[in-house]
Amino acid sequence: MSQELNGFAALGINALLLEAIAAAGYEEPSPIQEQAIPVILGGHDMIGQAQTGTGKTAAFALPILNQIDPSRREPQALILAPTRELALQVATAFESYSTRMPTLNVVAVYGGAPMGPQLKAIRQGAQVIVATPGRLVDHLTRNPSLLSTIRFSVLDEADEMLKLGFMDDLEVIFEAMPEERQSVLFSATLPHSIRAIAERHLRNPQHIKIAAKTQTVARIDQAQLMVHADQKIPAVLRLLEVEEFDALIAFVRTKQATLDLASALEAKGYKAAALNGDIAQNQRERVIECLKDGRLDIVVATDVAARGLDVARITHVFNVDMPYD
Ligand code: AMP
C-alpha cells in the first residue's frame, strides 16, 4: 500500500475499505472527503454543499460502509438519488468500495425496470438500497416496513430532487424510516426549500461546503473541451498534433490513468513518463529533472505526485480528468 493511502487511514477508514480504494487507484482523499468522512464516522448528521465531480459519493459511501454490519442481512443504508443514472452510478460506487466485504450487497431501485428482481434483492438481505424516490414509494406501498431497519440515510443532489418534483415522495420515505438514524444531505445549492427539509429531518447537522470558486490567472489562456470519457486519450493525441508545445504536464486522477496515458503517448513517439504516488521519491525527482532538461517532454501525473512542481519549460497543462480545485 502506498504511503498516500494514509490519508484515508488517518480519517478512520478500515483496512478492507482501504484495500478497495487502493484497487480503485485513489491516492488521497479529495477535499470533501477529508471534511465529510470524520463527521459521518463521528455519527453526526451532515449537510454537504458540493457538486458532482468533487468525490462526494465516496465522501458518504466510505464512512457508511465503515459503519454497516455486513453480518446483518437487512437494509441498513438508504441512498436517494434523483435519476436512474445517478442511482446506478452510486450503486456501482458502493459495489466497488465493498469488494472486500463479501457479505455486503447493494440493490439499485429505480423505475422503468421490473419490480421483481429489486424485491428479490431486498428480500435476500441487501444492506444498501440506492433508490429513486418514485419507485421506492411503490415498494413502500407494498411493504410499509421496508425501511424500518435503516440506520443511515443520504439525500443526494437534493436540489435536483426538488426540481424533479419529488418533494411529496421524500416526505413519505422519511416518515417510513426510524427517527434515530443518521442523515446526510448533499446539494449543490441550498435554497430555502432544501433548508426546510434539513430542518424537519436532520438533527443538529454539521455543514460542510466545498467552494466552487473560479480563479484564473490572466496570463494563462484557458480552454475546455467536452469529450466522452473513453475518448479522452484520442483527444489528447489529436490536440498534441495541432498544438505547438515545449514541455507539457497532463493531470489525471488515478495511478492507472497516468500509466495508460503515458504509454499511449510513448507509442506515438512522444518522450513521456508517468508520475504517481507509487513511484519512489528519488525516481520522481529524476522524472522532473528529465522534464527540465528535455530528455522528457510530457509528464502524466496525479496531483499528489506533482505537488509543488516548478519547471520553466512547461508551456501547456492538460487537466485530462477534472481537477478537484
Ligand atoms: P463524484 O463527485 O462522487 O461523482 O466522483 C467523481 C469521480 O471522482 C468518480 O469517478 C470517482 O471514482 C472519482 N474519485 C472520487 N474520489 C477520488 C479520490 N480520492 N481519488 C481519485 N478519484 C476519486
Image (cartoon, rainbow, N blue to C red):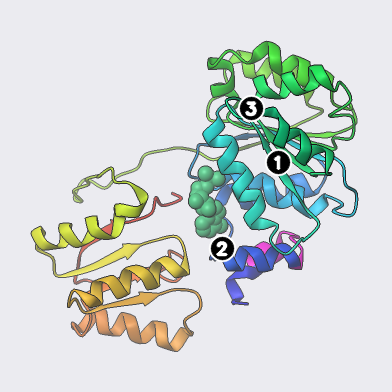
How far apart in space, not on screen, are marks 2 and 3 (Cα)?
Answer: 26 Å
Can residue 212 be seen here?
A: yes
Q: Which mark is residue 27?
A: none
From the image, tell me which residue sits under label 1: 107
Describe the element under mark 2 as helix, strand or loop: helix
Q: Are marks 2 and 3 in contact (CB under 8 Å)?
A: no
Q: Nearer the viewer, residue 293 or 142?
A: 142
- Pick whichever of labels 2 and 3 is earlier in the sequence: 2
Q: From which residue to which does the magenta span run?
A: 7-15
Give the quarter of the image for residue 266. bottom left
Residue shown at 63% from the left, 53% from the top? 34
Q: Which mark is residue 24?
A: 2
Q: Is residue 35 left or right of residue 322?
A: right
Q: Is residue 245 left or right of residue 303?
A: left
Mark 2 or 3: the one toward you: 3
Can residue 311 be seen here?
A: no
Q: Which part of the image, by quadrant, shows the N terminus?
A: bottom right
- The residue carrying pointer 1 sits among few (fewer than 14), some (14 to 19) or many (20 or more) residues within 10 Å by Cα, namely many
- Pick whichever of labels 1 and 3 is earlier in the sequence: 1
From the image, tell me which residue sits under label 3: 132
Mark 2 or 1: the one toward you: 1
